[in-house]
Image: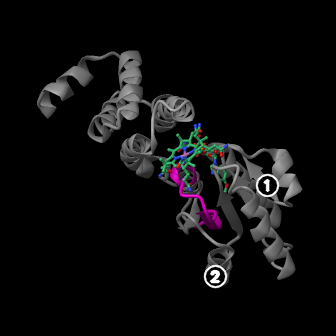
Amino acid sequence: MSDDEEEIILRDLNDEELVAQMQDDLYDGLRDEVFEGVEILLERKWDPNAILSDALVEGMRIVGIDFRDGILFVPEVLQCASAMKGGMGLLRPLLAASEHAASTGKYVIGTVKGDIHDIGKNLVGMMLEGAGFEVIDLGINNPVENYLEAIDKHKPDILGMSALLTTTMPYMGVVIEELDKRGILKELPVMVGGAPLNQEFADAINAHTYGRDAAMSAELAKTIIGRNR
Ligand code: B1M
């Protein structure tokens, strides 16, 4: 089937069918189709946040279930991630369109050592940009040295760490301990987030804040900046 024919079919769907189709396409790792679905919903004046949550994040949630149950494997899930990122790329400028002329503050963010999941972190970064933050993204698999170097170089107002694995989340505690030893922690609020985390864990490792999701994290970051000024 040609791209044009596929386009006509997607465009023929009503909103509900289209969102369901996009979740299927994300599951099948069809980057172009997911991208096109996002385009169509935007043309239909959907709120970018709703596209993100209803079509993309929900699609990825379904992928997660089948990944956990051994129905999908790493190569397939990588394709799903690529499709998700394609759609997110289109939404990025819209979510990050800041009403703020000046930067709200500087935010360094990175996924911790041993962990290569970056979709959630990227979303948090996008929302922070939307809230007017200058975001310095350290990417994935960051040892403590990377965070220290970035703090020294960029002098952020907040440090954010993301982890998606129960095996990598304790490393956040290692970073926080090191910041404490160096006297940085009392000056620099640390936000932690990621699917396996909760408030209890954040408290246990002495993090300043726990961000449950991207939108809430951006709000929390603004509150922290307001409090510190
Ligand atoms: Co991974 N993986 N994975 N994986 N993967 C999970 C996390 C898992 C829950 C799947 C499952 O079993 N159901 C499971 C973890 C189990 C556990 O630890 N208990 C798992 C596993 C086991 C693994 C491997 C070990 C598999 C293997 O190799 N056998 C391996 C590990 C690799 C490594 O990191 N060393 C692995 C690999 C991969 C891929 C590479 C294939 C791919 C990642 C691609 C990429 O990110 N570029 C992948 C994916 C895609 C997933 C799932 C399916 C989806 C994650 C995602 O992107 N979610 C995931 C299952 C799931 O979570 N449902 C799974 C969408 C995203 C928007 O949500 O990341 O939660 P999330 O982010 C949210 C919040 O958590 C929060 O805001 C975001 C937006 O609202 N948030 C923050 C996140 N970071 C934050 C930081 C903040 C604040 C909020 O402040 C700084």
Q: Amino acid at mark 1?
A: Thr
Give the left or right position of residue 42, taking residue 3 as reference. Answer: right
Give the left or right position of residue 115, taking residue 80 as reference. Answer: right
Q: Position of residue 174 (x, y in %)?
A: 78, 68
Which is more N-terminal, label 1 or label 2? 2
Residue at 57% x, 54% y: name it: 121
Q: How is the image coloured?
A: one colour
82 or 20: nearer the eye? Answer: 82
Question: Can residue 22 be seen at all in this image of the molecule?
Answer: yes
Q: Which residues are the magenta region? A: 102-123
The answer to whether 19 is drawn above or below residue 215 in the figure is above
**Rendered image: mark on residue 149:** 2
Quadrant in which residue 156 is drawn:
bottom right
Residue at 33% x, 35% y: name it: 34
130 or 52: nearer the eye? Answer: 52
SS state under label 2: helix
Question: Can residue 225 be seen at all in this image of the molecule?
Answer: no
Q: Position of residue 28 (x, y in %)?
A: 35, 32
146 or 128: nearer the eye? Answer: 146
Say if disc 1 is inside 8 Å of ligand 1.
yes
Instruction: Please say whether residue 191 is one of the residues in the magenta stretch.
Output: no
The answer to whether 200 is drawn above or below residue 110 in the figure is above
Residue at 37% x, 42% y: name it: 83
Quadrant in which residue 176 is drawn:
bottom right
Residue at 59% x, 55% y: name it: 128
| Cβ atoms under marks 2 and 1 closer than 8 Å | no
Q: Position of residue 43 (x, y in %)?
A: 32, 32
Quarter placement of the C terminus: bottom right
Q: Position of residue 208 (x, y in %)?
A: 82, 59
Say which residue label 1 marks. 209
- Total numbered labels placed on residues in the image: 2
8 or 28: nearer the eye? Answer: 28
